[in-house]
Amino acid sequence: MLYYCIFERMNSADTATVKILLSQPQKIVVIPHKNPDGDAMGSCLGLAHFLHQLGQKVSIIAPNDYPKFLKWLPGDDKVINFERENGQAKRALEEATVIFTLDFNHFSRTGQLEPFLAKSGATFIMIDHHQQPDTYAQVTYSDTSMSSTCEMIYHFMDALESTDKINKDIATCLYTGIMTDTGSFKYPSTTSKTHQIVAHLIDKGAQHTEIHQAVFDNNSPGRLHLLGVALRNLTIIEEYGTAYTTLSQEELDRYKYSKGDTEGFVNYGLTLEGIHFAVIFIENKEEGIIKISFRSVGDFSVNEFARNHFNGGGHTNAAGGRSDTDMKTTTQRFESILKEYKKQLTC
């Protein structure tokens, strides 16, 4: 069938290197970025299931906790949380001969894991679709045109001529990451190849309806209250085609915020007519920062905006950043910066 054709692959030299590495027993660690999302956890778990089939010893180390709506994924019970299981995580890192870094391309994206990765003597393999990758990996598979890292894991297995090893667990993990990182297949990065891969994953056992329900249909009362607060706090700047909202620590605490509760809130601004730049500012008093998510439609690069002004980055239409000042100062600065982009935001 069509979806069994050869897709985008790593270059031949990198493929040969990986084949040689995986032809021998290795102690492998797989790592997502801090605050991992569906694509990060889906790619790590999907890859781990695949590597287990090759007879490899594999550990997944998450830098910190992640949302409850991802903890049903097959193999989640084996994930080591670096913050909670520090000793076990350090031992795995010290013993690792190969480290896969998935869905990020700078060690700084791993929080407290960064110094341990920097001093590791393991062979690094990066698989990622974000812009401006670092040069730490011996094998770098980087493609910003890809919808998700999970789609790249499929291509990775295809390059190793091993898509026949995809089982229900792998299919479920990869489908979840592709679904979440494409906004349920609506973002521009979703291609015909993406759909071909998804069709194959469904044939391999991914239950698409059940996966969607597990990720999106388990709201808590607190999450819905927080959404109401975020919508009430919405500021619309028609002059710049921009909408932004805020959530303070007090508001988060009032409704018993749990990790992942604000997932997707930033996108509501983009549903407004004439708005093509949306932002959410979320206070985190424990870290002393304002966490920022940027989204856009069209050609306006939130990746460049985040990198230039808010210590962040990501994709053209989806990026993150941070501010070390308080909420009022941060939003005032944000509004003042918009003036520099008036032409881009109003064309």
Image (tube, rainbow, N blue to C red):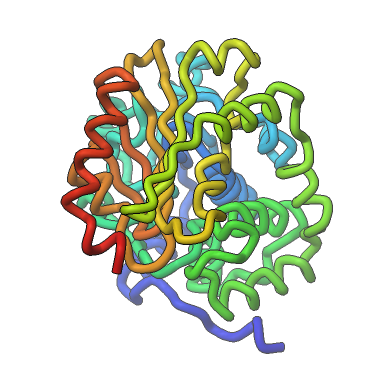
**Vertical placement of residue 24 versus 37, above or below:** below
Percent of width and height locating residue 69: 69, 36
Q: For the image shown, how many numbered marks are present on the structure?
A: 0
Query: Whole-percent x and y of residue 89?
Result: 47, 23
The residue at 61%/11% (across/down) is: 254
Instruction: Identify which residue is drawn at 46% across, 19% down.
Output: 248
Q: Position of residue 210 (x, y in %)?
A: 83, 51
Above or below, 83 relative to 342: above
Q: Left of 91 or right of it: where is 13?
A: left
Q: In the image shown, does 331 or 118 lie closer to the viewer?
A: 331
Asked if 34 appears above or below 318 in the picture, the reply is above
339 on left or right of 244: left
Residue 256 sits in quarter? top right
x, y percent for residue 302: 32, 53
| Observer-nearest of 267 and 159 | 267
Q: Classify residue 132 as left or right of residue 38.
A: left
Residue 98 seen in render: no
**Residue 139, picture quadrant:** bottom left
Tell me the residue at 41%/31% (across/down).
Answer: 281
Q: In the rendered view of the protein, which quadrant contains the C terminus?
A: bottom left
Outermost residue to the bottom: 1
In this picture, residue 45 sits left or right of residue 237: right
Q: Is residue 178 visible?
A: yes
Q: Quadrant of the N terminus?
A: bottom right
Residue at figure coordinates x 64%, y 59% from the top left:
184
